[in-house]
Image: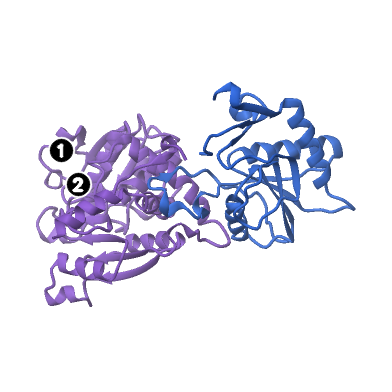
């Protein structure tokens, strides 16, 4: 096998900010053959047979955790799920101690979801196992952005030149950040739209335009990525009320009908129907929300496969950092 | 390639003749239905397509073809570092109960065929699985033999047997290059 036909992803996947456009394309291309495996009568290939993967989830997650678990199992890996509640984390164990204990049980990969930005990198620097960021604080959620990119590529046949607007709580969203990095690197035009209180200052520096009205965003965009409005934001005073938010920023059938083209609608889930997205949009013909879920498994299989070929010398480096 | 150590085993006409003979040998008999040809990526896929075309032209039987990418079933994946690019696997029909002929360009160690057998069995339970190769070069490391063989050549372990197909290489030929590592 010559070098040109192999793909190097390194030891970890922490975010899309530090990954090249070519690497992102290689991950998406690798996801294509993995889609087919989930359609087989026996949905399992032996590529990670004998590997042990720990899903370390310090924050609640249904979709991402299950998606990773399916991806791992369909590659033949053995998996262990550790949730923060019900583990020694609640007894005050630090992240590094938890990880070192898992390492001592001879694991190969860790998928980590954590409430603090930087937690995945922190872990990756200290353990020799491959680390995949399953979402860290307000930093990044790279596999979500990759599945969004794959779904957009399926819908349009390309990413380059697409106009994609991310709608909602941009300020607190790791999904928004990862999407912005990924879309920009693949040559898409990116905009964000939401209440001023939920748009971070200086976001234009990322090469992103800002719409204050969702009608303008719909007028402009080929695709809308509608983010979940985290309900706790309302109590923190970022928006006046859910009804008000829906009235001003809700992606509704009536608004989409006025679009100059057929707008494709994505949502990372879980949805607040009737708040950021109306049911007739979520379940309508523009929606690619369920294809996103299907693609999530394929994209995560691709990432796991590529990381399994990660450079051993990087693992050695991480091991040194541990001592 | 250094010309003085390369020996042409089959030219385009030779490949064509070999494929016609192989198609005749594997052709359905006594009203048998359900033959399926599955080519191994990459060059087995083109060879399977040509075998199917010959069966259609000369015998009027329509034989479906599929393709297998065996990368995920390789037994050396954990040894090779960066992961290879994976091609598409496409099996167009239910395989349970059918006679399936696996088609590959060169049979060498037998490890690719072992991987293909494992992958096929994840799609169902064929009535029978057979193997067709254009070149059997010897050097088996597993107890695997072909049912249909275009040509046999006793190649050294370090020799390279190169099959070219028009779709990928702009010509149709089989060449033995001496003293080179395969891959």
- What residue is shown at x 31% (from left), y 45% (from top)? A225
Q: Which chain is blue?
A: B
The residue tagged 2 is A170
Under tag 2, what secondary structure? Answer: loop
Count the labels in the image.
2
Colour pattern:
by chain
Q: Earlier in the sequence, mark 1 or mark 2?
A: 2
- What residue is shown at x 36% (from left), y 60% (from top)? A68
**Mark 1 belongs to which subunit?**
A
Return the x and y of residue A314 as percentages of the image width and height.
25, 49
Q: Give yes or no for contact between labels 1 and 2 (Cβ–Cβ under 8 Å).
A: yes
Task: Out of A233 and B85, give the one closest to the viewer.
Answer: B85
**A38 relative to A221 in the view: left or right:** right
Above or below, A113 against A160 in this view is below
Return the x and y of residue B138 as percentages of the image width and height.
66, 46
Return the x and y of residue A320 as percentages of the image width and height.
17, 55
Quadrant for the C terminus of chain A in the image: bottom left
Above or below, A130 against A83 in this view is above
Residue A203 got which mark?
A: 1
Under tag 1, what secondary structure? Answer: helix
């Amino acid at each position: 096998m010559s070098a040109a036909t192999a793909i190097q992803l390194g030891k970890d996947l922490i975010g899309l900010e530090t990954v090249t456009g070519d690497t992102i394309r290689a991950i998406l291309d690798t996801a294509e053959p993995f889609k087919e495996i989930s359609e087989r009568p026996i949905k399992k290939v032996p590529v990670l047979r004998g590997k042990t993967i720990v899903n370390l989830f310090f924050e609640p997650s249904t979709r991402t955790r299950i998606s990773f678990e399916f991806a791992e199992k369909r590659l033949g890996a053995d998996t262990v799920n550790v949730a923060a509640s019900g583990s020694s984390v609640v007894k005050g164990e630090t992240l590094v101690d938890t990880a070192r204990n898992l390492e001592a049980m001879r694991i190969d990969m860790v998928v980590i979801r954590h409430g603090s930005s930087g937690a995945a990198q922190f872990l990756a620097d200290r353990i020799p196992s491959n680390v995949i960021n399953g979402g860290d604080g307000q930093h990044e959620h790279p596999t979500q952005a990759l599945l969004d990119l794959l779904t957009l590529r399926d819908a349009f046949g390309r990413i380059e030149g697409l106009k994609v607007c991310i709608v909602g709580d941009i300020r607190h969203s790791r999904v928004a950040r990862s999407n912005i990095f990924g879309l920009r690197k693949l040559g898409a035009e990116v905009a964000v739209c939401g209440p001023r209180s939920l748009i971070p200052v200086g976001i234009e520096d990322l090469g992103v335009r800002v719409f204050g009205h969702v009608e303008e965003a719909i007028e402009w965009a080929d695709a809308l990525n509608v983010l979940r409005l985290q309900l706790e934001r309302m109590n923190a005073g970022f928006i006046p009320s859910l009804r008000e938010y829906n009235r001003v920023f809700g992606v509704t059938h009536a608004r989409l009908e006025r679009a100059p083209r057929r707008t494709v609608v994505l949502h990372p889930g879980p949805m607040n129907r009737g708040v950021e997205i109306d049911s007739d949009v979520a379940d309508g013909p523009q929606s690619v929300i369920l294809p996103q879920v299907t693609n999530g498994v394929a994209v995560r299989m691709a990432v796991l496969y590529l990381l399994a070929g990660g450079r051993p010398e990087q693992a050695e480096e991480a091991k040194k950092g541990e001592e | 390639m250094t010309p003085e150590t390369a020996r042409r085993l089959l030219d385009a006409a030779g490949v064509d003749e070999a494929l016609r003979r192989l198609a005749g040998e594997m052709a359905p008999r006594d009203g048998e239905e359900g033959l399926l040809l599955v080519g191994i990526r990459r060059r087995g896929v083109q060879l399977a397509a040509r075998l199917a075309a010959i069966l259609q032209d000369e015998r009027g039987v329509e034989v479906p073809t599929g393709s297998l990418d065996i990368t995920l079933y390789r037994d050396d994946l954990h040894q090779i570092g960066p992961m290879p690019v994976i091609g598409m696997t496409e099996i167009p029909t239910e395989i349970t109960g059918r006679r399936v002929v696996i088609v590959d360009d060169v049979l060498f160690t037998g490890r690719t065929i072992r991987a293909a057998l494992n992958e096929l069995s994840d799609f169902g339970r064929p009535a029978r699985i057979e193997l067709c190769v254009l070149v059997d070069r010897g050097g088996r490391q597993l107890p695997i033999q072909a049912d249909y063989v275009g040509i046999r050549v006793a190649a050294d372990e370090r020799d390279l047997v190169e099959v070219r197909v028009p779709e990928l290489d702009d010509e149709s030929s089989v060449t033995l290059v001496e003293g080179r590592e395969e891959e």
